[in-house]
Image (spheres, rainbow, N blue to C red):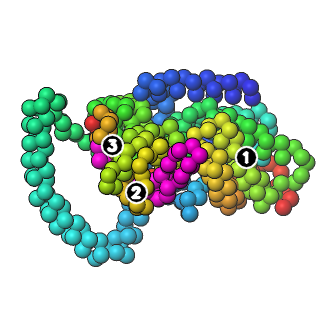
C-alpha cells in the first residue's frame, strides 16, 4: 500500500508545486518541471508497472490542473518514465548525484517526446524548454530523489 | 503500457471534442478544485510574503508612485468624457447611414490560476456564470493576452496569443497602416505574415488588433515590430512582433464581453 500512496501523494504535491511555485522560480526563463521530476525519480525507485502508472497519473494530474491536452502529456510521461526505468535495470549503483543527472536527462527526453506528439510547442521551443528545465531539475532532484528513495527504501549505494 | 497510453489518447480526444464546442471536460471540472484550491492558496501566500518584503524595502517609493498614478488617472478621466461624447456622435452618424452602432463592451476581471507555457494555455477564475463565452478577448494592462477557449461555471481556459494556433487580424500603426494576419510563434513573439507595401514600417511600430473581428475589439495593443523578414523569391514579407509583456508574469486579466 505504501507504493501506491507514495505515488499519488508525491505526484499530487508535485502538481501543486508545478502550478504555484514553478512560475515564481523562473530564472532566465528556466522553470522547474516538478511533475516530470517526480515521475523520473519514481522511475529510478520503482518497478515497471508502477513506473507506467506514475507516468499516467502524472500526465492526468497535470492535464487536470493546467488544462494541458491529456494525450501528449500522458504519452510523453509514460514513455519518458519507462526509458528512465531502463537505466535502473542496467545494474549500475545509482546514488543521489548520478540519479539526479539521469532525472535531468529524462526530463529532456520527456520534453522532446512531448515535442513529437504536441507540435504546438515547436522544435526550438521544446529543445530550449527541455534543456532549461533539465538543468533546473538536476538541482532540485538531489533532495527530492533522496527523499523518495528513503520513503520507498530502495538501494542506497553508488555515486 | 499500451492500455494506459490508449486511455490517455481516448481522454485527449474526448477533451478535444468538448473543447471544440467551448466546454471543459467533466473530469477536469470535477477534480480541478482538488488541485487549484491548494495551489491558489500557496501562490497567494507566497505573493503576500513577497508584497510584504517589497513594502518594507520600497514603501516610500511605492507610495509616491501610487500618488503619481492617481494624478495621471484623474487627468485621463478628463479625456474619458470627451471620448464618450465622440463615441455617441460616431454612433449617431453610423445610425444615420444605416450601420449598427458600436456597443460598449463590459469587462469581467479575473485572476490567473495557472499557466502552462508548453500548451500556451492559461486558466482564469471567471467562467460562464459571469457571462464569459468562447472567443471573447482577454486583456491585461499591457494589451491582448488571448481569447477564451473553453469555459465552465467559474473557470475558463484562455488560448494565449503566443500559441501557434492563435490567429487574428492585426494592424501596424504606421503611416499608411499595414494590416495582416498575426499568429503566435514563440513564447515572446508573434509573426505577422503576408504584409504588403510595408517598406515604410519602422522597427518599434505598435501593432494592435484590427477592426475586422466581431468578438475581439479593435485597437487593443498586441506588441511592437521587432524584425522584418523578407523572402523575395516567395514575394512574402513577415514581421516578428514582440509582445508587450511576459505571459508568465500576468496575474490579473479582464475579459472583454
Q: On the picture, is A145 further left or further right than A28?
A: right
What number is the disc on residue B201? 2
Residue at left offset 77%, top offset 32%? A49
Output the chain of dot 2: B
Q: Secondary structure at mark 3?
A: loop
What separation in Å lies between label 1 and label 2 (alpha carbons)? 42 Å
Q: Is residue B104 above or below residue B206?
A: above
Question: Which region of the structure is painted magenta?
Answer: B218-246
Are discs 1 and 3 both within one chain? no
For marks 2 and 3, give the one nearer the viewer.
2
Residue that mark 1 sits on: A109
Q: On the picture, is B253 further left or further right than A132?
A: left
Residue that mark 3 sits on: B210
For marks 1 and 2, give the one nearer the viewer.
2
**In the rendering, at what x and y percent does residue A4 appear?**
68, 36
Mark 2 neighbour density, 10 Å: few (under 14) some (14–19) many (20 or more): some
Residue at left offset 53%, top offset 44%? B235
* Closer-to-camera residue (B120/A1): B120
Judge whether residue B202 is colored magenta. Answer: no
Judge whether residue B243 is colored magenta. Answer: yes
Q: On the picture, is B106 further left or further right than A139?
A: left
Residue at left offset 61%, top offset 23%? B10
Q: Secondary structure at mark 1?
A: helix
Mark 1 neighbour density, 10 Å: few (under 14) some (14–19) many (20 or more): many
Task: Determine whether label 1 and label 3 are within 8 Å by CB.
Answer: no
* Closer-to-camera residue (A16/B7): B7
- Please say whether residue B53 is visible from this viewpoint: yes
- N-terminal of the pair, mark 2 or mark 3, is 2
**In the rendering, at what x and y percent does residue A51 appear?**
74, 38
Amino acid at each position: 500500500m505504501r507504493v501506491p500512496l507514495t505515488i499519488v501523494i508525491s505526484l499530487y504535491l508535485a502538481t501543486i508545486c508545478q502550478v504555484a511555485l514553478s512560475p515564481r522560480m523562473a530564472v532566465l526563463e528556466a522553470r522547474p518541471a516538478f511533475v516530470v521530476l517526480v515521475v523520473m525519480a519514481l522511475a529510478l525507485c520503482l518497478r515497471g508497472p508502477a513506473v507506467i502508472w506514475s507516468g499516467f497519473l502524472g500526465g492526468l494530474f497535470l492535464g487536470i490542473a493546467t488544462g494541458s491536452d491529456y494525450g501528449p502529456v500522458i504519452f510523453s510521461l509514460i514513455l519518458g518514465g519507462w526509458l528512465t526505468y531502463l537505466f535502473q535495470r542496467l545494474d549500475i549503483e545509482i546514488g543521489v548525484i548520478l540519479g539526479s543527472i539521469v532525472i535531468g536527462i529524462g526530463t529532456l527526453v520527456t520534453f522532446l517526446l512531448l515535442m513529437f506528439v504536441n507540435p504546438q510547442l515547436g522544435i526550438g521551443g521544446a529543445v530550449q524548454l527541455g534543456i532549461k528545465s533539465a538543468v533546473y531539475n538536476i538541482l532540485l532532484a538531489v533532495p527530492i530523489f533522496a527523499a523518495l528513495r528513503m520513503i520507498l527504501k530502495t538501494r542506497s549505494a553508488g555515486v | 503500457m499500451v492500455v494506459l497510453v490508449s486511455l490517455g489518447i481516448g481522454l485527449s480526444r474526448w477533451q478535444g471534442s468538448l473543447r471544440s464546442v467551448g466546454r471543459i471536460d467533466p473530469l477536469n471540472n470535477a477534480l480541478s478544485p482538488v488541485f487549484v484550491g491548494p495551489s491558489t492558496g500557496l501562490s497567494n501566500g507566497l505573493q503576500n510574503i513577497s508584497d510584504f518584503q517589497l513594502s518594507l524595502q520600497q514603501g516610500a517609493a511605492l507610495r509616491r508612485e501610487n500618488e503619481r498614478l492617481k494624478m495621471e488617472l484623474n487627468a485621463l478621466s478628463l479625456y474619458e468624457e470627451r471620448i464618450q461624447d465622440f463615441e455617441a456622435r460616431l454612433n449617431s452618424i453610423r445610425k444615420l447611414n444605416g450601420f449598427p452602432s458600436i456597443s460598449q463592451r463590459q469587462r469581467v476581471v479575473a485572476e490567473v490560476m495557472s499557466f502552462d507555457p508548453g500548451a500556451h494555455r492559461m486558466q482564469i477564475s471567471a467562467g460562464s456564470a459571469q457571462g464569459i463565452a468562447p472567443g471573447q478577448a482577454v486583456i491585461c494592462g499591457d494589451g491582448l493576452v488571448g481569447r477564451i477557449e473553453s469555459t465552465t461555471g467559474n473557470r475558463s481556459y484562455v488560448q494565449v496569443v503566443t500559441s501557434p494556433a492563435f490567429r487574428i487580424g492585426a494592424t501596424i500603426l504606421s503611416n499608411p497602416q499595414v494590416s495582416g494576419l498575426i499568429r503566435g510563434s514563440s513564447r515572446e513573439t508573434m509573426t505577422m505574415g503576408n504584409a504588403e507595401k510595408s517598406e515604410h514600417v519602422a522597427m518599434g511600430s505598435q501593432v494592435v488588433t484590427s477592426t475586422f473581428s466581431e468578438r475581439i475589439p479593435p485597437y487593443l495593443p498586441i506588441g511592437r515590430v521587432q524584425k522584418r523578414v523578407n523572402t523575395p523569391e516567395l514575394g512574402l514579407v513577415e514581421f516578428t512582433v514582440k509582445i508587450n509583456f511576459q505571459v508568465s508574469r500576468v496575474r490579473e486579466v479582464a475579459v472583454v464581453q
